[in-house]
Amino acid sequence: MTDIAAVIRREHARIRRLLGELDDALAEAGLDGPGPAGRLSQSWAVLAALLEAHLDVVEEICFLPLAAVSPAAGQAISQAESDGADLRETLREAELHPPGSREWLLAVRAAADAARSQLSCVDTALAEYARRAAPRDRDTLHQQWIAYSQVRILGD
C-alpha cells in the first residue's frame, strides 16, 4: 500500500528542486537583459509542464478529500486554490512573451512565487490529512492519483 502523502511530498520535493534550479538560472539571467535564455527556457519548459500536470491532478483528486479532514485543512486548500489560479495565470502570461525577455522573466518569477505558496498550502493540508485519514482512504486516493495521471499523460 502506497501512501498518497508520500507521493505528493516526493513530487513537491521534485518541484522545489526544479524551482531552485530555475532560481539559479534566473539569477544568472537577471532582469535587465536576455541573459542565457536557452538554459533558462529549457529549465522553465520542464518546470511549467510539471506544474500544469501537478495542478491538474492535485485539484482534481486531492483538494476535496484534503479539505474535508479539518477546518484548518479546508482553509489551506482554499488558499491553495487561489494560489493555483494565480499560478495558471502566470503560466499563461509567460507563454505570451519571448523567453529571456523582461516580461517573460517577470511572469516566470511570479509563477515560481505562486507555485511555492501553493505547495506550502497543500503541504499544510496534507499534514492534517496524513494525521486524520485512514490508511485505506490514503491508499484509495493514491490509486486515483495514479489513474488520473496516466489518463492525463496518455491523453496529451
Image (cartoon, rainbow, N blue to C red):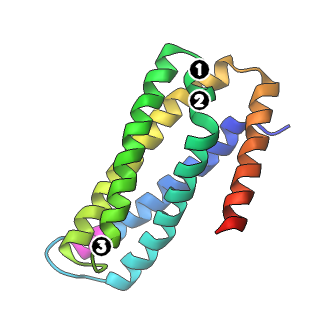
Image height of 5 relative to 70, above or below: below
Q: Nearer the viewer, residue 31 or 20?
A: 31
**Kind of residue at badge 2:** Leu
Q: Main secondary structure of the magenta part?
A: helix
Q: Which mark is residue 84?
A: none
Three-letter amino acid code of the residue under disc 3: Leu
Residue at 43% of width from left, 42% of height from top? 118
Identity, as a three-letter code, of the amino acid under mark 1: Ala
Residue located farthest toward the top when viewing the structure as drawn: 71
Disc 2 packing (10 Å; few <14; some 14–19; many ≥20):
few
Residue 23 seen by the camera = no
Residue 45 x, y percent position in the rendering? 46, 72
Q: Which mark is residue 68?
A: 1
Tell me where residue 70 appears, x and y as whole percent: 55, 15
Left or right for 27, reference 73: left
In the image, the segment drawn in magenta is 26-30
Along the viewing direction, whichever of 79 and 41 lies nearer the viewer? 79
